[in-house]
Image (tube, grey):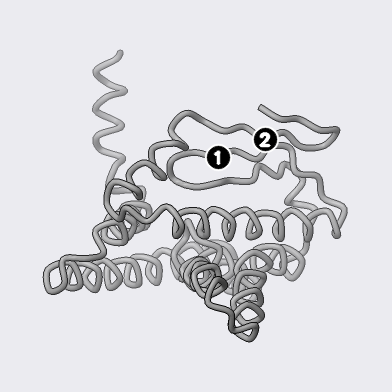
């Protein structure tokens, strides 16, 4: 773990599983390096905007399912400021994609593509992604949090399900995209209503009593 005055970085052992699975399924270490660099710049953009608004980031955790920022002071931000902080990561990725594409060198193509893919994926209006948070913030600003929850849940489930079907079709027709299919399946799982899991949780609670 790395720690500074206002933020700590924790890398969990599971963080090694995703790169290992990616290499096993794709065997493209250069692409993995490009994606990891894009992810690092993505998170730094979030961090920079939060600091710009005077909000401290207490913990940055990297797991096998991605990276998360723990921000206890997030409630201090307005809807607009929080929306900007959520959008900062994918916007930086897309900006770098444009810049690297304009440079036009062969060695930059892979890194430009990684920036584009990460930026577009994070703008998907699915709750675990930045796009899902942006959708919720916009809906909450226009209505109220309860309606925003319902809107974000419905849109997130529809988009993640469509993405899963698209990736499944790609795998069945081309034999490629298994890693994307697994990612889409995870998004569907994260988009499912929490009520679906409540009966099993209640059963476990009663059994423990």
- Sort mark 2 into few (<14), some (14-19) or many (20+) by Cα contacts within 10 Å: some
Is residue 69 depicted above or below 202 in this figure? below
The answer to whether residue 135 is visible is no
Calculate the distance from the C-alpha at mark 2 to the C-alpha at mark 1: 8 Å
- Determine the secondary structure under disc 2: strand
Residue drawn at point x = 59 percent, y = 38 percent: 61
Q: Which residue is farthest front? A: 106
Left or right: residue 200 versus residue 86 is left
Residue drawn at point x = 52 percent, y = 30 percent: 12
Which residue is identified by label 1?
A: 62
- Determine the secondary structure under disc 1: strand
Q: Which mark is residue 9?
A: 2
Disc 2 or 1, which lies upstream in sequence? 2
Instruction: Out of 128 and 21, give the one closest to the viewer.
Output: 21
Residue drawn at point x = 24 percent, y = 28 percent: 203
Residue 22, percent from left and from top: 35, 50
Residue 62, percent from left and from top: 55, 40
């Amino acid at each position: 773990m790395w720690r500074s005055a206002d933020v700590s970085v924790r890398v969990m052992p599971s963080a090694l599983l995703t790169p290992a699975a990616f290499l096993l399924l794709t065997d493209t270490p250069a692409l993995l390096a490009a994606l990891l660099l894009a992810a690092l710049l993505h998170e730094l953009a979030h961090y920079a905007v939060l600091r710009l608004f005077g909000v401290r980031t207490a913990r940055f955790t990297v797991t096998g399912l991605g990276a998360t920022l723990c921000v206890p002071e997030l409630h201090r931000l307005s809807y607009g400021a929080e929306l900007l902080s959520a959008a900062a990561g994918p916007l930086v990725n897309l900006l770098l994609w444009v810049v690297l594409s304009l440079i036009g060198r062969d060695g930059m193509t892979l890194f430009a593509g990684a920036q584009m893919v990460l930026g577009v994926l994070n703008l998907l209006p699915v709750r675990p992604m930045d796009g899902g948070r942006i959708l919720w913030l916009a809906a909450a600003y226009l209505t109220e949090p309860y309606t925003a929850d319902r809107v974000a849940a419905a849109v997130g489930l529809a988009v993640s399900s469509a993405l899963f079907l698209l990736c499944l079709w790609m795998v069945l027709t081309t034999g490629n995209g298994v890693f994307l299919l697994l990612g889409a399946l995870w998004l569907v799982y994260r988009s499912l209503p929490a009520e679906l899991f409540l009966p099993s949780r209640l059963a476990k609670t009663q059994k423990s009593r």
